[in-house]
Image (cartoon, rainbow, N blue to C red):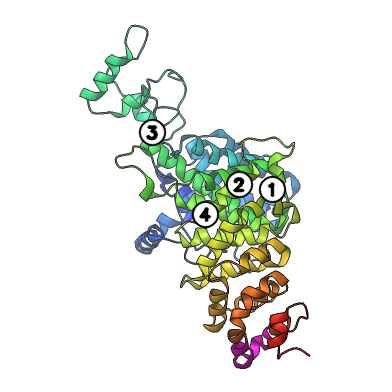
Amino acid sequence: MQKRDQSKLGGTAGGATTQAAKRGRPFGSGGSNSAAAAAAADTAAPSTLLGPSLHVHSSFAGLEDGDQDGNLDQNNKRIVLALQSGLKSELGWAINALTLLSFKEKDDVRKDATPLAKIPGLLDALLQIIDDWRDIALPKELAKAPRARLLGANSSVTGFGNEFEALGSNDGLPHLGSGSSISEASVQKNTNKLRPSEWWLDEDGLFNLDEEGRAEKQQCAVASSNIIRNFSFMPDNEVIMAQHRHCLETVFQCIEDHITESEVPENFPMLPEDEELVTNALETIVNLAPLLDLRIFSSSKPSYIKITEKRAVEAIMGMLGSAVKAWHCAAAEFLGRLIINPDNEQFLLPFAPQIHKRLVDLLSLPAVDAQAAAVGALYNLAEVNMDCRLKLASERWAIDRLLKVIKTPHPVPEVCRKAAMIIESLVSEPQNRAHLLAYENAFAEILFSDGRHSDTFARILYELTSRPNNKIAAARGIWGM
C-alpha cells in the first residue's frame, strides 16, 4: 500500500476540508475561522494547497470512470484497509482520495460505477474514525483527574502526536513499576516541566495522545464527517445511510455532545468539539431527513451508541436553540422534513410548544435565511398535524411575524407564499377563528394591495367571516357568497 511522507501530511485531513466552498452549505455557516483560512489560502503557494498528498492516483480512475470490476474492487478494498489501519500516513492518503472522489458540484455529472456508500465496510470505517475521536473528545462534564499509565507501554506507535519523540528519548525517566508509587510520580511531574517522553507514562500518552496528536485525530474526524456529508448528497446513498443505525447514532452523538470554544473552561487541557464536525453532522441528517424514521433507534439493528428517539429530538432541539445561524437554520429545516413522516409525529409532538416558540422567534430575526427555514418548518408542521395548527395559532406574535414576512416582503417569493398558506391552514380550524379575527383588517389590506397573494387571502377571509357556525363572524361577514 502506497504511503505518504509525514512531512507532507500537514494538509491531509484539515486541508481537504477547507479547499473549496462546500455545496449545499447553509448561508452564513462559515465563521471567523473560515475567513482566516480563506485569507491564508490566498497567500499560500499552489503546491501547498494541491501537493502530492491531495493527488488521487490514476489507478483510482475506476471510481469515477467505471473501470473494470476487478480494478474497482481492488481500489475499494485498498481505501477501506487504509482507513481501518489507524496509521496516520494511510489515513491521510485515504481521506484525501475520498474527499476528492466524494465531492461533486451541483451541475457535475459523474459516472460512478458503484455508489461510495455501497462499498463494503467503507461507511463503517469512516464512522470508526469519528467514534475514535469522540472517545477522547471533550465531554460536557469537567475533566477527570490524570492517572498513571498502566496499559500498552510496549505497543507500537501509530504516528500521531509526539509518540516518536517519546520512543526515541533517552532521558532515563524510570517506568512506573511495582517499586515506584504513583505519589512519587506525581511529585516528579510537578517539579519537572512535562517533556514529550513523559506522555509515554501518562494516561494522555500512547492511546489518548498529547495535544498535537489529539488535534490530528480531530482533523481526521472532521475530514471523515465531511466525506459522509458529501455521501448524503448522492441519491444512491440516501436510503443506505438513512437505514444505517451506526451512521445515525454517530452523527446524532456529535450533535448532542457539541461544545463551542466559549464553553470550554479556562486553562482546560482538552480541545473543544470542532464546530465543523457539528455542521457536517447537521447537514448530513438534513439531507437524510425525508427518509429518516426515528424508530430505527429502538429497532433490532445492532446499536453502537445508545441513542434513543427522545435523545435524538433533544439533540436537534439544542441545535434549534443555538445562537449559531447555520445550526438553528439546519435544525429548523430538519424538523420540517422529519414531520412529513407520520411515524415520527409521536416523537416530535411532545416538543411542539418549544418548537413553535423557537420557530416564531426565528421569524423575528433579520437574517432572511433564518426566516426561510422557520417558515418552511412551520409550513410542514401546520400542513400535517391539527394539534400543531391549534398551538401555532395561539402562539404569541406568530401571526404578526408571518404577516411581516409577507409585507416586507421576503426576497424569495416561495417563502412569502408558504407564509400565506400557513395562515390559511390555521384559519381552517374553527377553534382558531377567534384568535384570527383580530387580524381581519390586516388580511383585507394584503388582499387589495398585493395581487400575488390576493387569492389566498380571499379564501382566508371567506373561511374566517362567513361560516354559519361562527355567530360573530356571520354578523360581520362581508366577503362570503
In-image side of 192 versus 177 (left or right) = left
Q: Which residue is mark 3?
A: 143
Q: Residue 356, position in %: x, y?
A: 58, 62
Comes first in the chain, label 4 or label 3: 3
The kind of residue tagged 1 is Leu
Q: Dot 3: within a 10 Å radius of its alpha carbon, few (fewer than 14), some, or many (20 or more) residues?
A: few
The kind of residue tagged 4 is Met
**Image: magenta residue range:** 444-458
Q: Which residue is mark 1?
A: 294
Q: Dot 4: within a 10 Å radius of its alpha carbon, few (fewer than 14), some, or many (20 or more) residues?
A: many
Q: Residue 410, position in %: x, y?
A: 54, 79
Give the camera-side residue of 154 and 89. Answer: 154
Q: Which residue is mark 2?
A: 312
Quadrant of the drawing holding the C terminus: bottom right
Residue 272 visible (yes or no): yes
> Is residue 42 highlighted in magenta?
no
Comes first in the chain, label 2 or label 4: 2
Q: Which residue is mark 4?
A: 319
User: From mark 4 to mark 3, how far is it between C-alphas?
Assistant: 24 Å
Give the camera-side residue of 32 and 12. Answer: 32
Comes first in the chain, label 1 or label 2: 1
Identity of the residue drawn at 30% across and 42% down: 266
> Is residue 450 highlighted in magenta?
yes
* Identity of the residue furthest to the top in this view: 179
Identity of the residue drawn at 36% across and 24% down: 202
Comes first in the chain, label 3 or label 2: 3
The kind of residue tagged 2 is Ala
Q: Are marks 1 and 2 in contact (CB under 8 Å)?
A: yes
